[in-house]
Image (cartoon, rainbow, N blue to C red):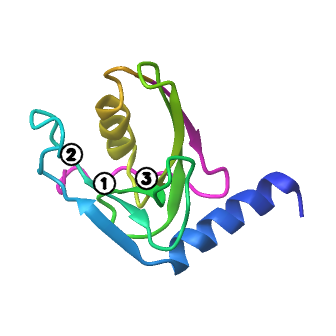
Amino acid sequence: MKPNSYFWREMAQLAASTPIVIDRPQGRPHPNWPKLIYPLDYGYLEGTFASDGGGIDVWIGSLGTRTLTGILCTFDTLKRDAEIKLLLGCSEEDVRTISDFHDDGMVYLFIKNPLETIHDLPRSLS
């Protein structure tokens, strides 16, 4: 198995098998910046560890699945902090929404899971 495929399969397995804690539900403000409203559910994988000392961050998209859509790599230029965020069950519109959310004070790179296809929601549901 190629290293790239192995990485994506392991990350997808982790996301599918680990409980998710949603500590910032869609429509709620950030605890420190009340004008910053979360456009989708945001949380972390329970029992995992990231460089900031918390769990691995996750965004939950509108597709209703735990499919690993991709990874958002963020760099906060003010705090000089880099993180990854797993995007689960995200449509193309969800990816744009999440990217826009991180656009203020951060630079980011979205890496699409090459083993999955991102689908837009049917127009009648969007």
Residue 124 painted magenta: yes
Image spot of residue 114 (x, y percent): 66, 50
Upstream in the sequence, badge 2 or badge 1? 2
Q: Which mark is residue 111?
A: none
Disc 1 + disc 3, Cβ < 8 Å: yes
Q: Which residues are magenta?
A: 107-126
State the SS at label 2.
Answer: loop
Q: Residue at horizontal 66%, vertical 57%?
A: 115
State the residue at coordinates (17%, 46%).
31
Q: Is residue 72 visible?
A: no
In the image, 20 versus 94, the foreground residue is 20
Circle 1 residue: 121
In the image, residue 20 sits, relative to residue 92, either above or below, namely below
* Quadrant into which the N terminus falls: bottom right
**Would you name the residue on which mark 2 appears?**
39
Q: What whole-number distance in Å separates the C-alpha atoms at marks 1 and 3? A: 6 Å
* 10 Å crowding of disc 3: few (<14), some (14-19), many (20+): few
* C-alpha distance separating marks 2 and 1: 16 Å
Question: Residue 8, can we see it?
Answer: yes
Amino acid type of disc 1? Leu
**Secondary structure of residue under mark 1:** loop
Q: Are marks 2 and 3 in contact (CB under 8 Å)?
A: no
Q: For the residue marked with disc 3, what is the amino acid?
A: His
Residue matched to label 3? 119
